[in-house]
Amino acid sequence: MKLSIVAAAAIAAVGLGACGGKPSAVAGQGAATPTASAAAGASDTGSVQQTALVDGKPIWAANRRHSAEENAQYQFARNGGQFGARSERDYILKVHAFVERPPNDAQYLDRANGDRLIYAPGVNTFAVVSREGAPRTMFKPRTGAAYWAQQKAIAARSADSSGAGGGQG
Protein backbone atom coordinates (compact mmCIF):
# COMPACT_ATOMS: atom_id res chain seq x y z
CA MET A 1 0.00 0.00 0.00
CA LYS A 2 2.80 2.38 0.98
CA LEU A 3 4.57 1.60 -2.31
CA SER A 4 1.38 2.41 -4.29
CA ILE A 5 1.07 5.82 -2.63
CA VAL A 6 4.74 6.62 -3.26
CA ALA A 7 4.46 5.46 -6.89
CA ALA A 8 1.33 7.54 -7.46
CA ALA A 9 3.01 10.61 -5.94
CA ALA A 10 6.08 10.09 -8.14
CA ILE A 11 3.96 9.78 -11.28
CA ALA A 12 2.06 12.96 -10.37
CA ALA A 13 5.31 14.83 -9.73
CA VAL A 14 6.76 13.73 -13.07
CA GLY A 15 3.53 14.76 -14.82
CA LEU A 16 3.51 18.21 -13.23
CA GLY A 17 7.23 18.64 -13.87
CA ALA A 18 6.71 17.96 -17.58
CA CYS A 19 4.10 20.73 -17.69
CA GLY A 20 6.18 23.28 -15.83
CA GLY A 21 4.09 22.76 -12.69
CA LYS A 22 0.90 23.80 -14.49
CA PRO A 23 -2.09 21.60 -15.33
CA SER A 24 -1.63 19.47 -18.41
CA ALA A 25 -2.59 21.06 -21.70
CA VAL A 26 -3.66 17.66 -23.00
CA ALA A 27 -5.59 16.39 -20.00
CA GLY A 28 -8.89 17.39 -21.50
CA GLN A 29 -8.25 16.24 -25.05
CA GLY A 30 -11.32 14.68 -26.51
CA ALA A 31 -13.55 16.56 -24.10
CA ALA A 32 -16.01 19.11 -25.35
CA THR A 33 -14.65 22.64 -25.47
CA PRO A 34 -16.88 25.24 -23.87
CA THR A 35 -18.87 27.04 -26.54
CA ALA A 36 -18.76 30.82 -26.61
CA SER A 37 -20.65 33.11 -28.90
CA ALA A 38 -18.87 34.53 -31.91
CA ALA A 39 -19.11 37.96 -30.35
CA ALA A 40 -17.13 36.88 -27.30
CA GLY A 41 -13.35 37.08 -27.33
CA ALA A 42 -11.18 34.29 -26.00
CA SER A 43 -10.09 35.90 -22.78
CA ASP A 44 -9.10 32.78 -20.90
CA THR A 45 -7.07 33.59 -17.85
CA GLY A 46 -5.50 30.12 -17.75
CA SER A 47 -2.38 28.99 -19.56
CA VAL A 48 -4.35 27.38 -22.39
CA GLN A 49 -6.23 29.86 -24.56
CA GLN A 50 -9.65 28.68 -25.69
CA THR A 51 -11.11 29.85 -28.95
CA ALA A 52 -14.73 30.91 -29.23
CA LEU A 53 -16.89 28.59 -31.33
CA VAL A 54 -19.67 28.95 -33.89
CA ASP A 55 -21.82 25.84 -34.20
CA GLY A 56 -19.05 23.80 -32.57
CA LYS A 57 -16.32 25.04 -34.91
CA PRO A 58 -13.59 27.60 -34.16
CA ILE A 59 -14.63 31.14 -35.07
CA TRP A 60 -11.46 31.51 -37.15
CA ALA A 61 -8.14 29.81 -37.77
CA ALA A 62 -5.16 30.92 -35.73
CA ASN A 63 -1.70 31.02 -37.25
CA ARG A 64 1.87 31.34 -35.97
CA ARG A 65 1.62 35.08 -35.45
CA HIS A 66 -2.00 35.76 -34.52
CA SER A 67 -4.81 34.23 -32.50
CA ALA A 68 -8.08 33.20 -34.08
CA GLU A 69 -9.72 36.32 -32.68
CA GLU A 70 -7.01 38.61 -34.08
CA ASN A 71 -7.30 36.99 -37.51
CA ALA A 72 -11.10 37.34 -37.46
CA GLN A 73 -10.78 41.04 -36.58
CA TYR A 74 -8.25 41.59 -39.39
CA GLN A 75 -10.33 39.72 -41.98
CA PHE A 76 -13.48 41.62 -40.99
CA ALA A 77 -11.67 44.97 -41.33
CA ARG A 78 -10.27 43.94 -44.70
CA ASN A 79 -13.19 42.06 -46.30
CA GLY A 80 -16.34 42.53 -44.20
CA GLY A 81 -17.60 45.43 -46.30
CA GLN A 82 -17.62 43.25 -49.43
CA PHE A 83 -20.38 41.18 -47.81
CA GLY A 84 -22.33 43.99 -46.16
CA ALA A 85 -21.28 42.82 -42.70
CA ARG A 86 -22.33 45.35 -40.05
CA SER A 87 -20.03 43.94 -37.37
CA GLU A 88 -17.24 41.44 -36.85
CA ARG A 89 -19.78 38.97 -35.46
CA ASP A 90 -21.98 39.45 -38.54
CA TYR A 91 -19.00 38.79 -40.84
CA ILE A 92 -17.98 35.67 -38.89
CA LEU A 93 -21.51 34.29 -39.16
CA LYS A 94 -21.63 35.04 -42.91
CA VAL A 95 -18.31 33.29 -43.46
CA HIS A 96 -19.37 30.22 -41.48
CA ALA A 97 -22.65 30.08 -43.39
CA PHE A 98 -20.75 30.19 -46.70
CA VAL A 99 -18.16 27.53 -45.86
CA GLU A 100 -20.69 25.21 -44.22
CA ARG A 101 -23.39 25.59 -46.89
CA PRO A 102 -21.79 26.93 -50.09
CA PRO A 103 -23.96 27.81 -53.10
CA ASN A 104 -24.80 25.01 -55.53
CA ASP A 105 -22.29 26.30 -58.09
CA ALA A 106 -19.38 26.15 -55.62
CA GLN A 107 -16.15 24.50 -56.73
CA TYR A 108 -13.70 22.92 -54.29
CA LEU A 109 -10.00 22.26 -54.06
CA ASP A 110 -8.42 20.38 -51.17
CA ARG A 111 -4.82 21.13 -50.16
CA ALA A 112 -2.43 18.53 -48.78
CA ASN A 113 -2.49 20.33 -45.39
CA GLY A 114 -6.25 19.70 -45.09
CA ASP A 115 -7.38 23.20 -46.07
CA ARG A 116 -10.34 23.38 -48.43
CA LEU A 117 -10.57 26.18 -50.99
CA ILE A 118 -14.08 27.10 -52.09
CA TYR A 119 -15.04 29.32 -54.99
CA ALA A 120 -18.62 30.17 -55.94
CA PRO A 121 -18.61 31.93 -59.32
CA GLY A 122 -22.26 33.00 -59.14
CA VAL A 123 -21.50 35.27 -56.18
CA ASN A 124 -17.76 35.64 -56.94
CA THR A 125 -16.76 34.50 -53.46
CA PHE A 126 -13.55 32.70 -52.51
CA ALA A 127 -12.94 31.16 -49.09
CA VAL A 128 -10.45 28.92 -47.35
CA VAL A 129 -11.43 26.73 -44.40
CA SER A 130 -9.20 24.47 -42.29
CA ARG A 131 -9.90 20.77 -41.81
CA GLU A 132 -11.26 21.71 -38.36
CA GLY A 133 -13.87 23.95 -40.00
CA ALA A 134 -12.13 27.19 -39.02
CA PRO A 135 -12.23 29.85 -41.74
CA ARG A 136 -8.93 31.38 -42.89
CA THR A 137 -10.34 33.96 -45.30
CA MET A 138 -13.34 34.91 -47.42
CA PHE A 139 -13.36 37.63 -50.04
CA LYS A 140 -14.52 38.56 -53.52
CA PRO A 141 -11.53 38.25 -55.88
CA ARG A 142 -11.04 41.32 -58.09
CA THR A 143 -10.26 39.07 -61.05
CA GLY A 144 -13.13 36.66 -60.36
CA ALA A 145 -12.84 33.28 -62.06
CA ALA A 146 -9.28 34.10 -63.18
CA TYR A 147 -8.25 34.12 -59.51
CA TRP A 148 -9.80 30.67 -59.03
CA ALA A 149 -7.99 29.38 -62.13
CA GLN A 150 -4.74 30.73 -60.67
CA GLN A 151 -5.36 28.91 -57.35
CA LYS A 152 -6.03 25.65 -59.20
CA ALA A 153 -2.81 26.06 -61.20
CA ILE A 154 -0.80 26.70 -58.03
CA ALA A 155 -2.29 23.60 -56.40
CA ALA A 156 -1.53 21.49 -59.49
CA ARG A 157 2.12 22.64 -59.53
CA SER A 158 2.39 21.94 -55.80
CA ALA A 159 0.91 18.47 -56.23
CA ASP A 160 3.27 17.73 -59.14
CA SER A 161 6.33 18.77 -57.17
CA SER A 162 5.39 16.96 -53.96
CA GLY A 163 3.63 13.95 -55.39
CA ALA A 164 0.63 14.79 -53.21
CA GLY A 165 -2.83 15.25 -54.60
CA GLY A 166 -4.88 18.40 -54.36
CA GLY A 167 -8.10 16.99 -55.70
CA GLN A 168 -11.26 18.77 -56.59
CA GLY A 169 -14.34 17.60 -54.77
Image (cartoon, rainbow, N blue to C red):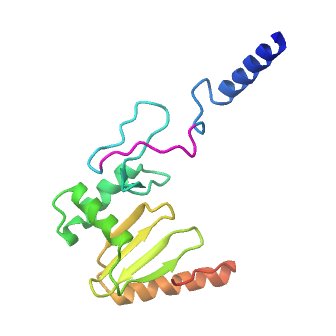
Residue that lies at the very extreme toward the right in this rendered image? 3
Residue 129 on the magenta segment: no
Tell me residue 99's x, y (percent): 37, 70
Q: Nearer the viewer, residue 147 or 85?
A: 85
Region rendered in magenta: 28-37
Q: Quadrant of residue 133?
A: bottom left
- Does 46 appear above or below 143? above
- Main SS, magenta region, reads loop
Image quadrant where residue 149 sits: bottom left
Q: Give above or below for 7 relative to 161.
A: above
Q: Measuring 38% from the left and 69% from the top, which residue is drawn there?
A: 100
Determine if the magenta segment contains residue 32: yes
Whole-percent x, y for residue 89 in the image: 24, 55
Q: Is residue 1 left or right of residue 115?
A: right
Q: Residue furthest front?
A: 1
Q: Position of residue 16 (x, y in %)?
A: 65, 25
Q: Residue at x 54, y 81 (%)?
A: 155
Image point 40% across, 52% down: which residue? 68
Q: Residue at x 30, y 51 (%)?
A: 38
